[in-house]
Amino acid sequence: MKRTIRFESEIGPAGALLASMKAVQQALAGSDGLSADQMAERLQEWQTLVSNLAGGVKRGAELATLYEVTQVINSSLDLTETLNLVMDLLIHLTGAERGCLMLLDEDGVLQIRAARQFELGSVDSADLELSHTVVQQSVENAQPVLTTNAQVDPRFSAQESVIGYNLRSIACVPLHVRGRVIGALYLDNRMKEGVFCEADLPMLKAFANHAAVAIENARLYTVTDQALAARVEELTTLQQVDRELNASLDLERVLELTLSWALRATRAEEGVLCILDKEGAVQTVATSNGGGAPALPEPETVKMALRASDPIVVGRLRILVPVRFEGQVIGLLDLRNNGGLLFRPEHAQLAGRLADHAAAAIENARLYEKVRQANEAKTEFVSFVAHELRTPMTSIRGYADMLAREMVGNLNPRQLQFVHIINGNVTRMQILVSDLQDISRIETGKMRFEVVPTPLSVSLQNALEVTQAQIDARSQKLTVEVPEDLPRVRADPTRLTQVLINLLGNANKYTPERGSIHVRVWANGSCVHCAVSDTGIGISPEDQAKLFTKFFRSENAAVREMPGTGLGLCIVKSLVELQGGEIQVESQLGEGTTFEFTVPAVAEA
Ligand code: ADP
């Protein structure tokens, strides 16, 4: 026997067998022969060697299968495909009839992930009649469980499933990942007993470990993949929300948009978005069905949300999100589900991120609304004051005129000079008041136009009559160029005269004495153009950028010594544009300026 072992260790079971057979052959051929006992001993030896040989072959097959499994596992990230292949290989290798792989779900319940049957492939996991006791024991103790015949195994023979399903050979191995049991591998054979033995366990454990790693990898891959997809979707949504929100400064619209996006993102059935003042009182509201139900949040709920720094899920049917801007709670988003989908913390977090994005837009819209209201109040006030000033000014002018005409007695030259100064200043005040009234009318959309077909030359003539004296006073040279066949324009003649008086007035004011003013009118396409040019002080490029804005006057000393309000060009631009035209300026500092505007022409037959 000892010799056999030596043989085997040196030359392997096959060599040992051959050597032993050769020795028997020689003994039989020789004169001594072999006794019956010796023959029996040899036969015993051969049996052992043959069984060792068979074991070697089986181990070889096991290793090949294990290699195959590893290849499958490493080459696929599709978990179901991997698990099915692993189970098929195991069934094939162990002689099992069926096999399944079970994983513990979030609630600790085992869920079958792959169920396979010899030569049949997939089986419905609901039809899999297996021993839950064996599985439970294996998972709870984190140890393999093996029975060669459950029918006679005292541990299981009394189990209902063992009797009912006629179970015999069973092997179950737990799946471990980082010291934690994540599921179990179950194999059985209902027909044959003794299919599995202790010697199979190391191999089954190796399979189980490989499968566990594959499952974990696939799970991580899926989780990462899903998380990435969710993140991309969320970012796309937020980008869209930002785009839509930034396009509007209307508070109601911004609230509606935010609410509808929040409802969509969280799949809430209904919701309310309130704007709160500093005391937490509800100011403005948007509701998911336009003002009817749902009800506003109760004062206690508002208080709770004001205290909370993060969104909260209440009873899984309600999400409360404080809308914060620069650390201050400016609103409350209240999303509800009446029994349908249950909210999870992720829903609240998503709604929170959405509210963060919306907060700036809400605040902007809120500020814009305040500014708009303040502007409206200012316009109303200006209009009121201008109106109220008209009567006393008319009275001052009337009395000053009477004095100037010496209707109430003679004035000495000094008194006469003072009365003229009063008259001059009243005229300036009247212009200012009239400009302010025009601006108020333009801003409130109350400017009226009597648009008729009218020759621009007539309005120009009227404007020149008003400004001629000023132009002469500064000894300026005026030239006018109007073609005879000029088409009429579609405009309010009075407002057109007002535009021309303003432009001529400016050309006169901002051109030094003996300078030139040139007016050119011409038709082009569907418009009549009018350009008022001067050889005056000109306008710097920086000042040109601010022209046409309310109260703008250049810092230039030559401008400041002239009377003016900075309202004229602003009114001119509105009057031109409200009548369907355009205005532009071209100027060189120190050389002169040209204002050119257009008026729609009447299509003459
Ligand atoms: P105002 O003449 O009462 O100051 P306007 O609105 O008519 O107000 O003009 C605004 C400003 O534009 C003027 O103060 C002046 O600085 C500049 N400006 C307007 N017209 C001319 C011009 N023809 N030449 C130079 N500067 C001009």
Image (cartoon, rainbow, N blue to C red):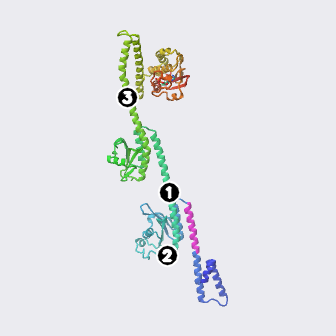
Q: Quick one: label 2 or label 3, which is nearer the N terminus?
A: 2
- Disc 1 beta carbon < 8 A from ligand 1? no
Mark 1, residue position: 222
Figure check: 547 above or below 518: below
Q: Position of residue 8 (x, y in %)?
A: 61, 79
Residue 67 seen: yes
Judged by its main secondary structure, the magenta piece is helix
| x 48%, y 53%: residue | 227
CB contact under 8 Å: marks 3 and 1 = no
Span highlighted in magenta in the image = 56-75
Q: In the rendered image, which residue does mark 2 sit on?
A: 194
Residue 600 in sight = no
**What amino acid is labelled 3 in the image?**
Glu
Name the residue carrying label 3.
380
Rounded to the nearest angstrom, the CA distance separating label 2 from label 1 is 39 Å
| Other-residue count near label 1 (Cα within 10 Å), few / some / many at <14 / 14–19 / ≥20 | some
Q: Is residue 394 above or below residue 92?
A: above
Mark 3: give few (<14), some (14-19) or many (20+) Cα within 10 Å. Answer: some
Q: Is residue 68 magenta?
A: yes
Question: Looking at the picture, which amino acid does disc 2 mark?
Answer: Gly
Where in the figure is residue 475, as x and y percent of width and height?
52, 14
